[in-house]
Amino acid sequence: MDAIRLVWNLFLQMIHQFRASDALDIILVSFIIYSGIKLIRETRAGQLVKGILILLVVWGLSYLLHLYMMETILSYFFQYTLIALLIVFQPEIRRALEQIGRSGDIGHKSWVLGFTSSQDEKHLRQTRQAVNAVVDAAAQMSKQKTGALIVFEMQTKLGDIIETGTIVQAVPSAPIICNIFFNKAPLHDGAMIIRDGLVYAAGCILPLTKNENVSIELGTRHRAAIGMSENSDAVVVVVSEETGQISVVVNGIITRNYTRETLRSKLESYLLSEKSGANEKKASWIPSIRKRKKL
């Protein structure tokens, strides 16, 4: 009974000392742990974490069973574990930090561009033109079984990828895109980068995915598309040279068998819906700002 009473008194003492900042602290730490677990489950890092947990269990058992040699070896191992984790998980950590940065940029960008509606409307028209051109070109290349790899740059800038190719900076159209990916053209093997609604570069080299669970049916072009989407928020369109199938890759996930209509709908949902919503918000801000100025 004394032990129960002692535990109860300690519990009441903790309740009395609990502050709002403690609740916020718990929520933040819980979110970080949840995000870490989610990141690990969605990548190959999960197997590595399982291995580390097994070593921790062995370390604990060696301490309890007085296995001094094993305990000493594992103690030295875990002294450098943090550095080893940073090296091993570097791609996953980089991807997580980029996602955090992108989520912060969206709100900031919308606020800044709220006072440049004309420029944003122009960008929206250019993006819509690029979507229409890519859809028409993909449909043609699908019928002709011409391989293509088209990357829409989003928040993450792809300057390092663009440097591997040739700068084009052309207004997008189906004939231009089809000519670039014509199998005897010098730039047909690489990827096309569309930036700000323009065909900005072609013949670019993309990083291949390291995901071992990718289907063996997918060739180098599809693996490059998955790798690009894993390292950025880009939207990637792929036309298979073997089957003519059209695929879309976003955030490392590939969806296949698109038609002209479904491809248009998919690209508009990723590239135009957010911008259109932002424009509506901006349009509602501008009148209110003008009223304040008149007052």
Image (cartoon, rainbow, N blue to C red):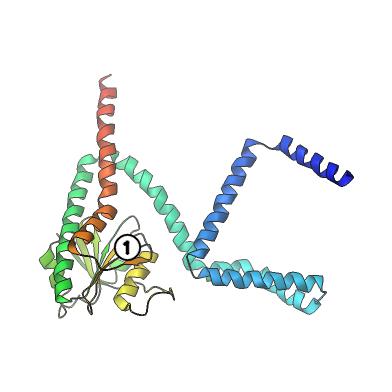
In the figure, 155 relative to 4: above or below?
Answer: below
Image x and y of residue 279, in percent:
25, 41
Q: Quadrant of the C terminus?
A: top left
Graded by Cα atoms within 10 Å as few (under 14), some (14 to 19) or many (20 or more), the crowding at tag 1 reads some
Residue 116's image quarter? top left
Say if residue 256 shows up in the picture: yes
The residue depicted at 26 percent of the width and 23 percent of the height is 291
The kind of secondary structure element at disc 1 is: loop
For badge 1, the amino acid type reads Leu
Quadrant of the image occupied by residue 175: bottom left
Position above or below: 7 against 51: above
**Which residue lies under the disc numbered 1?**
158
Residue reaching furthest to the front: 1
Q: Is residue 75 visible?
A: no
- Up-down: is 1 above or below 137? above
Query: Could you tell me residue 202's position as x and y percent?
Result: 22, 69
The residue that appears at 89% across and 44% down in the rendered structure is 2
84 sits left or right of 17 in the view? left
Q: Which quadrant: the N terminus?
A: top right
